Amino acid sequence: MSAPSRLAMVPFVSVAQMMQLVHRIGLAAMLRDLADAIEADFLRWEDFDKTARIPAHSREGVIELMPTSDGEVYGFKYVNGHPGNMKEGLQTVTAFGLLAEMRTGYPVLLSEMTLLTALRTAAMSARAARHLAPAGARVMAVIGNGAQAEFQCIGFQAICGIDTVRLYDIDPAATAKCARNLAGSGLRVIPCATAEEAIEGAQIITTVTADKRNATVLGDNMVGSGVHLNAVGGDCPGKTELHRDILLRARIFVEYPPQTRIEGEIQQLAPDHPVTELWQVMAGTAPGRESATQVTLFDSVGFAIEDFAALRYVLEKARETGLYTELDMVADPDDPRDLFGMLQRAAG
């Protein structure tokens, strides 16, 4: 049996290799690169097939498939969200992703995406804030100090120039963990005892909690004029973080309305409530923040084009650095019609 062809060998980026890649490039630099890659693909929004992600819900959580294609490359991400996993010492979110040629259908990359999702989520949040947050914003409150909190903080520091973060979580151990991990980052880190304390003086408020329920992490009276809200935690039906009245007085920006209306904060509103698509702001066809006193909300649920952009970036950097493993995962018989013969010859 002949050796597999190069087309049959698929680059695979493992968790260990992704961590090496981050350290090789630098965390802040990689977050900026990912933000650039995402915005570049948002600027060609019309090139993509777009569909809301495909969920399989259970009592414990959700498993989702997030597909898209630009006509030349197909990509998807498999991702789960299981808040109860933490009680068993497991990750709340795990993910992997794949890119393939549309021309042949052959895969060209398989990658871990648990780390990469945290990175691209932070990059997306911060790039949105670059377009929507008040000018000169330097203080961010982070409500929910779990697995994504540090990535959000470093992302906003690298992309928006944030220099102070005010942290709160219902579990003080999570806040202590986050503060410990951010030591040496150059950020001024202020652990807080309540959500009300955390938002004092903050021009940006990020909510990134994990519980799969309709929660009121922020009440209406907690959000003053001129604030930018980065709502990350509400990302499936029945899971929200903001009081409905906040939404009614905010200018709302979303990734893909058909998905966000099902999964985001705006699931609390009428189906025709006006929202602005973020790609239009990036393209200059719709305004972002319109006044210093306006409350802006990025209702972030994550969208397949963001993962597509992140995977394409990783493929480029993996090839540059050699930080990947080749997997023999596509059958490659000498005669494409003789798959059975390849199996027989393998017995020898």
Image: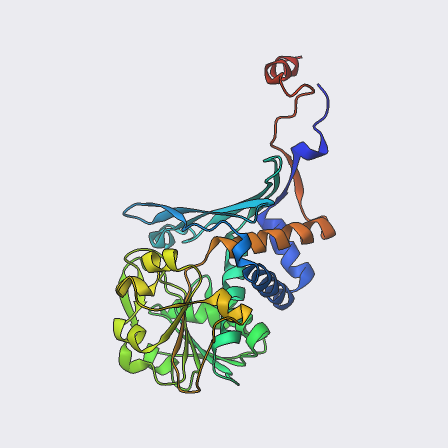
Residue 251 in the image: state x and y as whole percent.
38, 75
Residue 42 in the image: state x and y as whole percent.
54, 61
Quick check: 237 above or below 194? above
Q: Quadrant of the C terminus?
A: top right
Give the residue drawn at x 27%, y 64%.
268
* Left or right relative to 306: residue 246: left
* Left or right relative to 15: residue 93: left
Camera-side residue: 265 or 208? 265
Residue 194 in sight:
no
Q: How many marks?
A: 0
Q: Quadrant of the N terminus?
A: top right
Give the residue drawn at x 70%, y 28%.
4
Residue 163 image-quadrant placement: bottom right
Residue 330 in sight:
yes
Residue 273 in the image: state x and y as whole percent.
30, 67
* Left or right relative to 114: residue 311: right
Quick check: 68 above or below 254? above
Residue 171 image-quadrant placement: bottom left
